[in-house]
Amino acid sequence: MKDFFIYNYLQADFFLQHELKPIQIGKGNKDDIFVRYARNDKSEKVFDEWKEIKYGKDTRPAREI
C-alpha cells in the first residue's frame, strides 16, 4: 500500500486529531509542505471520514469532529 501524502493542512490536522502519527513532514516538488502518513486500515477509515465531511452529507467543519 502506498502512503498518504497530504498537502491540505486541515486534512493533516484531521488525521492528527484521530491519533494518526505522521511518518514524515517535508517539501514537495513545488516547495509546498506535505505531511506523510502510513496507509493502513486505521488511516483508510479516517480518510473515509474526511471524505464524508468534505464531500458527503456531514456538514460539520473538520475542526469539530
Image (cartoon, rainbow, N blue to C red):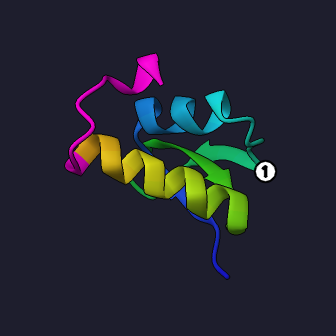
Figure check: 37 above or below 12: below
Q: Quadrant of residue 58?
A: top left
Identify the magenta region.
Answer: 55-65
Categorize mark 1 by other alpha carbons within 10 Å: few (<14), some (14-19), many (20+): few
Q: Position of 58 compared to 24: left or right? A: left
Figure check: 11 above or below 43: above
- 2 and 43: which one is in front? 43
- 58 and 50: which one is in front? 58
Q: Is mark 1 on a helix, strand or loop?
A: loop
Q: Main secondary structure of the magenta part?
A: loop
Q: Magenta includes 31?
A: no
What residue is rendered at 32% in x and 40% in y? 53
Three-letter residue code for mark 1: Ile
Residue 38 appears in the figure: no
Q: Quadrant of residue 7?
A: top left
What residue is rendered at 44% in x and 19% in y? 63
Please identify the quadrant where the N terminus is shown: bottom right
**Residue 38: where, in percent of width, then height?**
73, 61
Q: Which residue lies furthest to the bottom in this view?
A: 1
Q: Position of 51 compared to 44: left or right? A: left
Q: Magenta includes 56?
A: yes
Residue 19 appears in the figure: yes
**Residue 30: where, in percent of width, then height?**
38, 52
**Residue 27: where, in percent of width, then height?**
55, 46
Residue at the disc numbered 1? 23
What residue is rendered at 63% in x and 27% in y? 17
What residue is rendered at 63% in x and 45% in y? 26
- 21 and 47: which one is in front? 47
Q: Residue furthest front?
A: 57
Number of on-image labels: 1
Figure check: 54 above or below 44: above
